[in-house]
Amino acid sequence: MDRDPLPNQDQLQQLGMLLQDVLVCLRYSEPPESQALAYAFHNLPAEMFGWGTWSVSITRSRIAHFQKSNPGSRNDFLGAFNAIFPPD
């Protein structure tokens, strides 16, 4: 399994803002979109601080799966994540 260096302070702040946007979206989403969104992000708060395995690529793939499965989502969460961790 991939293990990346933990996010730096700036990246943590940006991830926090991303999670805030996710929570706002959850307030207005209905199942199954809300369930898929929760699944895509539920590990992020713990992983970004060192619990489990922090992997940018695995996190990106979960978010990409959500975006692909929910093309009508109000937010571009993958774009926001890629702004924090640009793809190679």
Image (cartoon, rainbow, N blue to C red):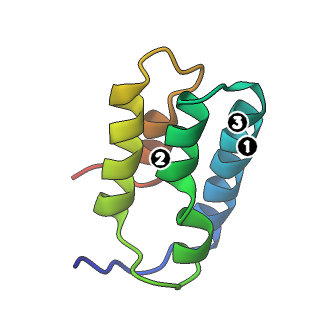
Which disc, if any, is residue 52? none
The kind of residue tagged 2 is: Phe
Look at 69% across and 57% down and name the residue there. Answer: 16
Q: Percent from the top left, x then y, of residue 86?
A: 35, 49
Which circle's residue, 2 or 3, is located before the other in the chain? Answer: 3
Residue 13, image quadrant: bottom right
Mark 1–mark 2 distance (CA, rounded to whole Å):
15 Å
Is 16 placed above or below 74 here?
below
Indicate the position of residue 70 as horizontal and vertical percent values: 43, 24
Task: Measure the alpha-carbon separation of dots 3 and 1.
Answer: 5 Å
**The residue positioned farthest toward the front in the image shown:** 31
Where residue 23 is drawn, which disc sits there? 1
Crowding at dot 1, Cα within 10 Å, few <14 / some 14-19 / many 20+, comes out as: some
The local secondary structure at tag 2 comes to helix
Q: With 6 as the anchor, is 1 left or right in this view?
A: left
The Cα–Cα distance between marks 2 and 3, rounded to whole angstroms, is 17 Å
Give the number of the disc on residue 26. 3
**Can residue 31 be seen from the camera position used here?**
yes
Which one is nearer the viewer's eye here, 61 or 37? 37
Considering only vertical position in the picture, is 84 above or below 33? below
Packing grade of label 3 (10 A; few <14, some 14-19, many >=20) is some
Direction from residue 4 to residue 40 in the image, left or right: right
Identify which amino acid the numbered label 3 is placed on: Leu
